[in-house]
Amino acid sequence: MKSVVHAACPHDCPDACGVLITVEDGRATKIQGDPSHPVTRGFLCGKVAKYLDRVYAPDRVLYPMRRVAEKGTGHRDGRDFVRISWDEALTEIAERLKSVTAEFGPESVLPYSYGGSLGVLNFGSMDRRFFHRMGASQLERAICSAAGGAGLESVYGVKIGTEPEQFRESKYIIAWASNIHGNNIHLWPFIEEARRKGAKLVVIDPYRTRTAALADWHLPINAGTDAALALAMMHVIINENLHDADYVSRYTLGFDQLKAKVQEYSPERAAQWTGISADDIRKLAREYATTRPAVIRLNYGVQRSERGGMATRTVAMLPCITGSWKEVGGGLQMSLSGSFGLNKDVLERTDLMTSASPLGRPARVINMNRLGKALTELNDPPVKAMIVYSCNPAAVTPNHNLVIQGLERKDLYTVVHEQFFTDTTDYADIVLPATTFFEHKDLQTSYGHYFLQVSKQAIAPLGECKSNVELFRELARYMGYTEAYFSDSEDTMIDAALASGSPRLIGIDRARLEKEGHVQVNLSPPDSYQNDRSVIKNTTAKNGDFVPFLPFAHGNFKTASGKAELYNEQLKALGLDPVASFEPPEESRHGAAAKRFPLELLSRKADNFLNSSFCNIASVQAIQEVGFLEMAPADASLRGVRDGDSVRVFNDRGEVELKARVNGSVQPGTVASHLQWAKLSLGGKNINALTSEKLTDLGNSATFYSVLVEVESTRPTV
Ligand SMILES: Nc1nc2c(c(=O)[nH]1)N[C@H]1C(S)=C(S)[C@@H](COP(=O)(O)OP(=O)(O)OC[C@H]3O[C@@H](n4cnc5c(=O)[nH]c(N)nc54)[C@H](O)[C@@H]3O)O[C@H]1N2
Ligand SMILES: Nc1nc2c(c(=O)[nH]1)N[C@H]1C(S)=C(S)[C@@H](COP(=O)(O)OP(=O)(O)OC[C@H]3O[C@@H](n4cnc5c(=O)[nH]c(N)nc54)[C@H](O)[C@@H]3O)O[C@H]1N2
Ligand code: SF4
Ligand SMILES: [Mo]
């Protein structure tokens, strides 16, 4: 029996691809991109194209397991564990949760989850209900995008922007902190189409990414200095009268204050911080303001530094002063996730903390970026039990060494629900087997396009795997939680999420999604001006039935004022400049610590892994090199480091061992490496041994790109 099932890739990636899975006699035999999906367009990235190798990998966790060896011994194949039944596992976990909550209160339990699956249900539904009902500590899920989200919302009031399909209409495309070719590959064909019609691609990135190598112009900016660049660009644009005075007066708030503020940021001054010459800043500003339409693909790399919120805010102002929101192929895209209008409350039920938990109030909040501190310092109450799912904190969380110190605690009870024996399962007391998206049903949104999808279950769960939804449904039963909401089926929850009453979702229900595979949310008025040709300068976008969506062509910002807030009063309360400002990160070449640790480290993602996922899959390892530190020739020779040398990379938080690659990927003063599992790295430490728990200015995000290190060769001297 052969069938083709429509699913959606749930990995933490803006593309949220439509996927077709061929199933023969119960086994998946082929995966391909859905050719009918307007953004997927029939192809998948290198890693998911090999997904059958991941689903049927020999090191999948297939059964509940109990630890029998010391924590942290870390055999990849799970030999530190013995198989137990689900009943034994759930009985033990429920008993342990009951005993720690009785002794230390429910806040001694910490859920820890993030981006393993962005499927709406598996990301956050039954799990949230479970922990809210219990009164467990709340996790502030700010490891990825919170600073950028807050920065964007400080100007627009909402996370929406230019749809990917419109990039083909652009004449000037800026990839700003955006490795499109590595992290957002489905935008690339639209950019290629635009370039065939004469568009220019500019990349602003301290690292020479694949995207930068393919661009018309690469500006290697110093990390964490983007606000200086954006402010200097606005200095040029405003002082040379290249802004759109009509758009500015109708739809923005605080232009006069911005005009005054940008006077402090001449291109000459910005050049000293950014490492980009004043002439290049002028050229960039003029080209951006005068080549129409111009679009910015801003990505989250910009906000992984100490002042990443403000950096995002300043870049987000650019299309508001040039009026580029009026044009098809103009505007800016960072995240489009604010467009789906789902009823998340009904899935997550935060109200249960007050109405059903023994606390009777919202539980304390623990920032996931500070896990190391939470596990080693917190005492009111201490964290005594942690349930990890869809996340690999022993690899991805900053200040790895402190995280490990916490995870090694003998009195910490750790349950990890996983697909693989990861760095984190090495510290688990119990490991539970998790389904992949082939094996469960979900609803899928996206942060890089406007299509909603139902991802159908293609095959039966392997071994005894359970989805996140099923796990917490079961665990609730073992805890003695009898409330009806713990019995909701997947379909019931999908229906409830869709029945939000949002205009975005009128006419979109589960039956339609299941039939059509993908459905674009309603981008109808007042958000779309599809029928108002007066605001559309470029009307060439007539690809099939494509109707361009211009979210802010007529203002319509979702801020309190309804305008793009170039002045935002609320920032004052946070101690930030209500207009904008730039200061270099403390942990950068401009800070005091640079005397001891003079090199800025970019602890980047790998092009062919997804954060720490995929790095254990042999066929993906074959397309991704690992374990190197890229250095500029000047920095290498200063330290006697030769290409291929083993180097020790260190700071006060830790050290890692890598192979030096002396090349042109980074400018002097910057080094770069990337993320993978710690236990697959030399010396058992990955790059997060060097990153810090310091949080960003807005959103309490992680600062993976504000890191100073020193490097030395470990080549024996003869
Ligand atoms: N292949 C692949 N795809 C992925 C992921 C992956 O791990 N691998 N991860 C997924 C996830 S979780 C996310 S959040 C998205 C995010 O994807 P991106 O936002 O694109 O995330 P990053 O790769 O962190 O950063 C993008 C680029 O910003 C650059 N950069 C670093 N610091 C600065 C800076 O201060 N200024 C500027 N201008 N540039 C800077 C980096 O060198 C990098 O090339 O991608 C998703 N897609
Ligand atoms: N140095 C450095 N560190 C980083 C980053 C960086 O750029 N540099 N990026 C950061 C960013 S942006 C992010 S988003 C985080 C991401 O960090 P994580 O959210 O931890 O993402 P992954 O590394 O992909 O690990 C997800 C794990 O969930 C498992 N999983 C997948 N699906 C499911 C499921 O349905 N159920 C369960 N129970 N498990 C599942 C996978 O097997 C995998 O081990 O990493 C952050 N860490
Ligand atoms: S990881 Fe991204 S590009 Fe790859 S299949 Fe999934 S959604 Fe598409
Ligand atoms: Mo992320």
Image (cartoon, rainbow, N blue to C red):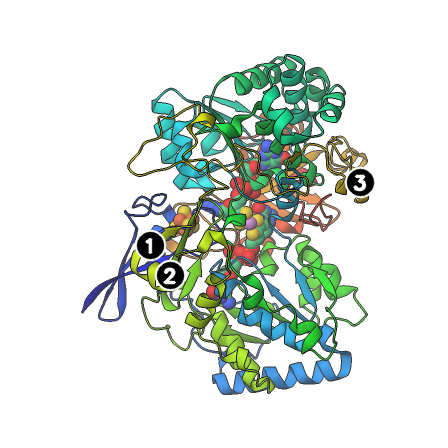
Instruction: Check contact, mark 2 vs mark 1: CB within 8 A.
Output: yes
> Which dot marks residue 455?
2
Which of discs 2 and 3 lies nearer the camera? The answer is 3
From what the image shows, is residue 367 above or below residue 314? below
Q: Nearer the viewer, residue 382 or 430?
A: 382
Pointer 3 residue Cβ closer than 8 Å to ligand 1: no
Is residue 706 visible in the rendered image? The answer is no
**334 or 394: nearer the eye?**
334
Position of the C terminus, as image quadrant, is top right
Q: Which amino acid is tagged 1?
A: Val
Q: In the figure, 677 relative to 357: above or below? A: above
Question: Crowding near pointer 2: few (<14 within 10 Å), some, many (20+)?
Answer: many
Quadrant placement of the N terminus: bottom left
Spot occupied by residue 589 in the image (x, y as percentages of width and height): 73, 31
* Precedes in sequence: disc 1 or disc 3: 1
Give the residue number, with chain letter if any, for mark 3.
Answer: 572
Residue indicated by mark 1: 19
